[in-house]
Image (cartoon, rainbow, N blue to C red):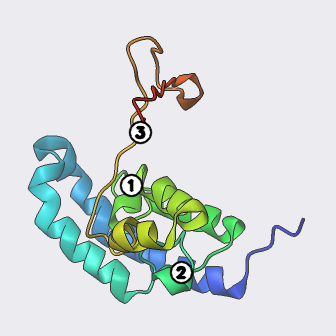
Amino acid sequence: MDFSLSEKVLQIAQKLRPFVDGEIVPLEPRLFAEGFGALEPELERLRGRAREMGLFSPQLPAAWGGAGLSLLELAHVGEILGRSPLGHYVFNAQAPDSGNMELLLQHGTAAQKERWLRPLAQGDLRSCFGMTEPEFAGSNPVWLGTTARREGETY
């Protein structure tokens, strides 16, 4: 496999590094002192800047408003965003939303994509992922269990 970086991702990295280091990282002292909620107005402004850069939801194809990056390119972008605990959030590439967007993209119906994927991709909606049940302690989703009981024609 060729691990060399494309010109596209090298150009993205040139834009990302100063943005992350100059605008996102300086917010960290406030994050740790005041909490995430205190930063929401500033984070929304930065998310707007990420949209303007064309790098919001980089894990999604361009048709869904993303940057259409390959996994290798996304890994390089993720390394830069990971310089700050706020980086992935600012670019709408944070868990659980990122993974849930990818699942909807690959397996969702057209209606589900319109209802859930589009607002997630635009950063207008947050998602969740439940991983713990009373009989299956822990956070490993492999251990989740469920039961469906038929009641007439429904479950």
Task: Name the side, left or right, on which 118 lies relative to 3.
Answer: left
Secondary structure of the residue carrying numbered label 1: loop
Residue 122 vs 80, above or below: the answer is below
- Residue 90 in the image: x percent, y percent? 33, 66
Q: Which residue is mark 2?
A: 67
Could you tell me the amino acid type at mark 1?
Ser
Q: Which residue is mark 1?
A: 84
Q: Name the quadrant containing residue 150.
A: top left
Q: What residue sits 38% from the left and 75% below the top?
A: 19
- Residue 120 in the image: x percent, y percent? 36, 67
Within 10 Å of disc 2 (Cα), the crowding (few <14, some 14-19, many 20+) is some
- Mark 1 and mark 3: Cα distance apart in space: 47 Å
Q: What residue sits 35% from the left and 69% below the top?
A: 115
Q: Name the quadrant containing residue 69.
A: bottom right
Secondary structure of the residue carrying numbered label 3: loop
Could you tell me the amino acid type at mark 3?
Thr
Q: Nearer the viewer, mark 1 or mark 3?
A: 3
Q: Can you name the residue that lies furthest to the right here?
A: 1
Question: Residues at badges 3 and 2 in contact (C-beta under 8 Å)?
Answer: no
Nearest the viewer among 130 and 98 is 130
Q: Which mark is residue 108?
A: none
- Residue 2 in the image: x percent, y percent? 87, 69
- Mark 3 and mark 2: Cα distance apart in space: 41 Å
Q: Nearer the viewer, mark 3 or mark 2?
A: 3
Within 10 Å of disc 3 (Cα), the crowding (few <14, some 14-19, many 20+) is few
Q: Earlier in the sequence, mark 2 or mark 1?
A: 2
Q: Which residue is mark 3?
A: 154
Quarter of the picture holding the C terminus: top left
Quarter of the picture holding the N terminus: bottom right
Q: What residue sits 44% from the left and 86% below the top?
A: 54
Task: Name the side, left or right, on which 16 lies relative to 39.
Answer: right
